[in-house]
Amino acid sequence: MALRNILQEEDPILRGKCYEVTIFNDHLGVLLDDLKETMFAADGVGLAAPQVGIPKRLCVVCVDGETMYELVNPVIVKTAGTQKGIEGCLSIPGKHGIVERPKTVWVEAKDRFGKPCKYKVSDLTAVAFCHEIDHLDGTLFIDKIISESK
Ligand code: CO
């Protein structure tokens, strides 16, 4: 495993649409492990592949320090409710703002072996899923801020 360099806001890779993962091999596993290690080292709760310069549709999320989600080709298939909360991003240090997100999301994805997985998550985990999945389409939370915060 290795720490990867986290790209910052001005990098164009963060604004591109990422490619579907089609090959589930050891390289994918290494990338997922590196994303986790890099996320924890940076004290984040989620990290998407484009943030480390890889324009592919995968991300990791761990909000509580224990439950780790690895999402490959994730798709939000259903949402319910709304919530507003403060967000930040490892690619935009020092910036925070209030964003409205679904309260609950249903997501279909693949695991690192290509096996289909379904998730239903709420609250902060739903925020993190939405934030990271947005990264895969070149969307940053600053695009969705409804009010600034300190
Ligand atoms: Co982010």
Image (tube, rainbow, N blue to C red):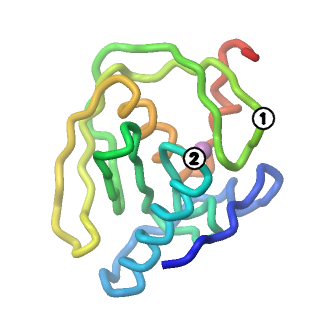
Q: Which residue is mark 2?
A: 43
Amino acid type of disc 2? Asp
Q: Is residue 32 left or right of residue 84?
A: left
Rendered residue at 39%/78% (across/down) = 28
Report x, y in % for residue 134. Answer: 52, 44
Quick one: label 2, few (<14), some, or many (20+) residues within 10 Å?
few
Quarter of the rendering occupied by the C terminus: top right
- Nearer to the camera, 123 or 64: 64
* Residue 115: image tag: none
Asked whether, in this view, residue 126 is left or right of residue 136, the answer is left
Asked where in the image residue 89 lies, by quadrant, the reply is: top right
Q: Residue 149 location in percent, x, y? A: 72, 15
Q: Are marks 2 and 1 in contact (CB under 8 Å)?
A: no
Q: Is residue 11 above or below residue 85?
A: below
Amino acid type, mark 1:
Gly
Q: Is residue 37 above or below residue 8?
A: below
Q: Residue at x 49, y 64 (%)?
A: 37
Asked if residue 136 is positioned above or below residue 78 in the image, the reply reads below
Q: Secondary structure at mark 2?
A: loop
The quarter of the picture showing ligand 1: top right
Q: Position of residue 75 (x, y in %)?
A: 33, 48
Counting residues from the N terminus, which is met first, the one under dot 2 or under dot 1? Answer: 2
Residue at 49% over, 43% down: 45
SS for dot 1: loop
Report which residue position mark 1 lands on. Answer: 94
Residue 110: image location, x then y, percent: 25, 62
Q: CA distance from mark 2 to mark 1?
A: 13 Å
Task: Indicate yes or no: mark 1 CB to ligand 1 under 8 Å.
Answer: no
